[in-house]
Structures are given as structure tokens and as C-alpha cells.
Image (cartoon, rainbow, N blue to C red):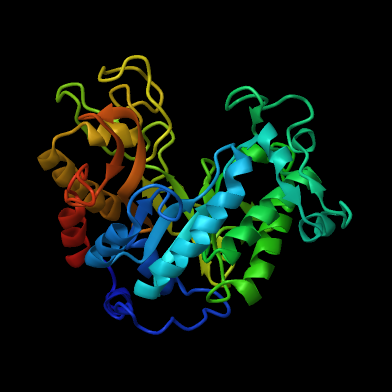
Amino acid sequence: MVSAVLSVLIAAAPATNAPAPKPWVEGLTREMLEGYLSRSITMLDLLTFTGEVNENIRMLENVRARFAGRGVYVWGGEDQLAARLEAARENAARIHEALPDLILQACAFEIVSEKVGEVTAPGWALHPFGLGTEPRPFRYEDMVYPGGRGGDQWGRGASVPDISRPETQAWFYYLGRSYIDAGCEAVHFGQVEIMAANDPERAHWDTVITAVRDWAKDHARRGWVLCDGHVPSGGLRRDGRLLLDFHSFPLRVKETPERPREGVLEVGFIDSFYGRSQGGVTPSGWSCEQLPYLVEVDNWGVSDRSGEVGVGGCWVWGWDEISWFAHQDEAYRNQWLRYAWDWVREHDANGWLQMPGSRTLAARAAGKHWYWANRPSVAVPSGFNQEATIKAIWARN
């Protein structure tokens, strides 16, 4: 259950067309942060070219969401970034006009492709990292691991970047600053650890994230940017300081062979995050034994044994988590969300379930290639109808 203080913060969320909220100035208290995490919903591509913006605004207002995750990003295809940023600026303004307190999150993922060479690096992105001031194309070869680590991991010409390299630092700074200018107040930095093999002390991540935060002080809507990433080791720390405002990780659903296609959550199952979030001094200045975190219904693909038990690894009946979830019937989806919310809160008070709102489906479910939590309507005929359940769960907590 949420605290009395947190309940007041949630109840006080601005109504539609309310004035813009005041700046956070020095960051968020733990109660303020959890007020957003406790009403967090994944809204993949909310700010770009997927879905109907007005319908998504209606749904987000109806459930009283306060944090919308993964609204704009590029996964490779960096030549599309300019168009996506333009759409994000327009849609973020529309959304904030209706929902001024809603935090919109962007993503800077663990991938860089050869298409990055079609993006012009401005002098302001290059100069902080000793790369001069003359605009030029970003250089893919100067971002990847020199020894070939993570090379072509995401397909030919699409690799894991090395955060110790100045060109990579300039790229992530460019992304973070651009997202803030588009109206986002949070940046998810993806699988930060696989990019840090040459950054054992996290000095380079510290440099990049600090640069993004410095820009946010004078340019973000409320003078702050919330940074997070997937951290299988438990956290991203430097000299006892936490570099991220909160942690995030997939749910890690465990198959139940005795109950076909069902799944449960379990502390200690493979690399699940429950009980493992590291603490320290937060970017906002308060200390904790364990940093608050989100667990999400993640997407990554589909195996060649979809619907089968025992594929192994992170697969859930051969699917990624969101495809598995979408393949259940509506009653089970609604029941499982109630179960997952209660289970996370009971097993780790630092954790919060990020509700599934919008997410791509690697394996079509009922012929649908995208998961929408929205109730079915003319605007979203393919809605999976978890909207009322999400609203009810949040209303009682």
C-alpha cells in the first residue's frame, strides 16, 4: 500500500488544463519520485507515429497516469531521429496541455548503427568531449568497441556502443539534450552495463549523465531530468553515489508447466531484480538502502518455439513478456495485472509495476501486431481492454 503522504501527492495531481507544475529545482524527494513510479505506464512511441494521440491522452487521463515510458527513441535507424524529434515536440506539447504533470520519457538505447553517420553532430555535442567544435557527421566506427565486443549484435552494421569512447559520449549527450528540448523529463539509458565494459569505475557514464542533467537545469520543463537504465548488477554507482534516479528491469515471468501458458513471479528466478536494487546517495541528495525501481512487461522478440514450455532463458512459453501477456485471454490479463501489482508490492517495497499501455508485439496475438491497454473503440479497435483494470488497481492503492 502507498503511504499517506504518497496518497496525498497522487490525489493532488493537476487536473486537465491545470497550470504547469512548479520546477523541481533540486530534484525529487523519495515520496515525490514514488508518486510518479506508482502511476507509471509504458507508452511505446506515444510521441511519434504510432497510435492516435487524442485517444491516448483520453486513456492516460482516465487512468490518472503520471509517468509515460518510452515515448520516443530510435533503435538503430538514426537517420529517422530528426523526424521523430519533430513529432515528439508537437505531441509532447499537446499532451502537456491536457496533462501538465505527466512525465514523458525518452530512450537512448544500447545500440548504434551505421545510419548514425547520417546525423550531423553539432559543435555543442562534440566540444564537451574534446572533439572540437566543427559540425560533422557522427562516426559509427568511433563509437563501437575497438576489439569487436558487441559488434553486429543487433544485426549487420548495428552494434553495442562503448561509453568510454568520446564519440559515444557525444552521441548520448546529443540524444539526452534533444529529448529534453522536445519536452521529455525522463531518459531511459537502456542496458547501461553492456556499454560499460571499459568503464569499470563508471566515470564515463557519470560524465555523460551529468552533462545531460546540467542541460536539464535550465531547459527541462521543471529543471530536472529523471534518468534510469536496466542494471542487472543492481545499480550504476560511482564513489557511493547513485548515477540514476531510479532503476528498471524486466519482470522475469516464470512459466508454470502444470498450468499451460500461465506464469508467476518469483524472487531469485534467473536474474530477476526483486530485492537487488542497490542504494547510496541519490542524484536528488537523499540516501537510501535500496533505490526505488520499476519492473516492466518487456519486449525483445519471439523464439522459434512460440507457445511451448521450457525454451529456457528469459522466454515465457517461447515468447517475450508482452507477447506472452497479449496471448492470454482478457480475463486472465486483468487478473494477472492485479496479481503482479500485489506481488511486487508485497515482496519488495522498493519496487513498482510499470503497467503495459502501448508496446510492440513480436508475435501477433489475435492478428494484432501492437498491444494497447485502451478499451476497444473506433479510435483503437484493436485495444486489449486493460484500461479499466489499471484504473481500478491504481484507485485502490
Residue 225 image point, x, y percent: 56, 66
Q: Position of residue 135 (x, y in %)?
A: 83, 53
Left or right: 70 with respect to 397? right
Which residue does the image show at 78% across and 25% down from the upper left? Answer: 147
Q: Residue at x 14, y 25 (%)?
A: 259
Residue 45 seen in the current view: yes
Does residue 115 lie above or below 217 as drawn? above
Q: Residue 188 or 279: which is nearer the viewer?
A: 188
The residue nearer to you, when weighing 350 against 248, is 248
Left or right of 215: which side holds 24? left
In which quadrant of the rendered image does the C terminus lie? Answer: bottom left
In the displayed structure, does residue 390 sit left or right of residue 152? left
Q: Is residue 360 left or right of residue 339?
A: right
Q: Quadrant of the N terminus?
A: bottom left
**Position in image of residue 301 (x %, y %):** 41, 28
Task: Spot the residue most to the top.
Answer: 304
User: In the current view of this chain or complex, which residue is farthest to the left?
Assistant: 331
Q: Nearer the viewer, residue 208 or 383?
A: 383
Q: Please tell me which residue is depicted at 49% across the width and 74% down the height of the picture.
A: 28
